[in-house]
Amino acid sequence: MKLYCVTRNIPTENIRLSQNNIVDPEDRYKQIFKIQVELPEDISAKDRQGILRSIDRCTVKRVVQTGPDFVIEEVENLDADAQALLTLNPDSEAKTCIAGKDLPLEQTIANMSGILAGLGIKIEIASWRNLVPNVWSLHIRDAHSPMCFTNGKGATRESALASALGEFIERMNCHHFYNDQF
C-alpha cells in the first residue's frame, strides 16, 4: 500500500490500517486475518480501489496463503553454515571465466565471502529467483542486521551472487549502510 501511495504522490499520514487475527476457538490453527483500512475522503475512487488491490496483492499475504515450507536442521555453527551458502557448490572444479574479468566467478565469490567473513559479517541468502531462463536474481543480507542488504542479478547463479556480494562490499565502502545515522 505504501509503495502504491508513494508512486502516485498520495499522502499516507491520514491512512490508517488495523490487522487483527481472529482465532477459531475450536481450532487455534484456523485463523482469519482481518485487515481494515481507513482512507481519507479526498482520495479518489480509482485510488481507493488501487490501494485495496495493492493490499490484496501483498507478498506476505501470498506466502501465508500458499503455505511456506519449513526446513528444520541442526548445524554445528550457524555462522559457518551461513557462509557455506555462499559457495554454491564447493566440490565443483568449475571455473566460470568472463572476458575482461581478472578471476573466475567462483574465485571472486570466495574472495568476497572471505573478506566479509573476516570482518565478522554473517551474510545470508534470503531468496533466489529464476523466473525465466538465464535470468537469476538473489537477495542477500547481514544476518545480524537484515536492513543491510543488496540484490544481485546475472545470467547464472554465480554471476548473480558475485553481483550481490560486490554491491554489498561497495555499499560498505561508501558508508551506504546506516548513512542516515551520521
Image (tube, rainbow, N blue to C red):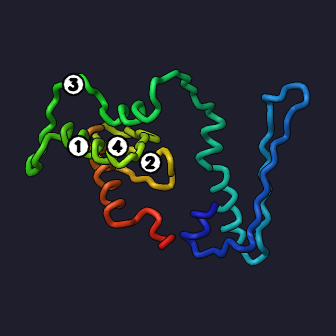
How far apart are labels 3 and 2 at the CA level? 25 Å
Residue neighbourhood size for the residue with mark 3, other residues' Cα within 10 Å, grouped as few (<14), some (14–19), many (≥20):
few
Amino acid type of the residue that numbered disc 2 sits on in the rendered structure: Arg
> Residue at image x 46%, y 55%?
148
User: Which quadrant would the N terminus be assigned to in this image?
Assistant: bottom right
Residue 14 sits above or below residue 77 on the image? below
Residue neighbourhood size for the residue with mark 1, other residues' Cα within 10 Å, grouped as few (<14), some (14–19), many (≥20):
some
Amino acid type of the residue that numbered disc 1 sits on in the rendered structure: Asn
How far apart are labels 4 and 2 at the CA level? 13 Å
| Residue 111: mark | 1
Q: What element carries label 1?
A: helix
Residue situated in front as seen by the camera: 181 or 132: 181
Residue situated in front as seen by the camera: 68 or 131: 68
Compared across the picture, whether 133 is left or right of 41 comes to: left
Of the numbered discs 1 and 4, the one sitting upstream in the chain is 1
Of the numbered discs 3 and 4, the one sitting upstream in the chain is 3
| Residue 149: mark | none
Amino acid type of the residue that numbered disc 4 sits on in the rendered structure: Ala
Image location of residue 90, percent across then percent down: 26, 26
Q: Is mark 4 on a helix, strand or loop?
A: helix
The label nearer to you, 3 versus 4, is 4
Residue occupied by mark 4: 117
Residue occupied by mark 3: 92
Compared across the picture, whether 11 is left or right of 149 comes to: right
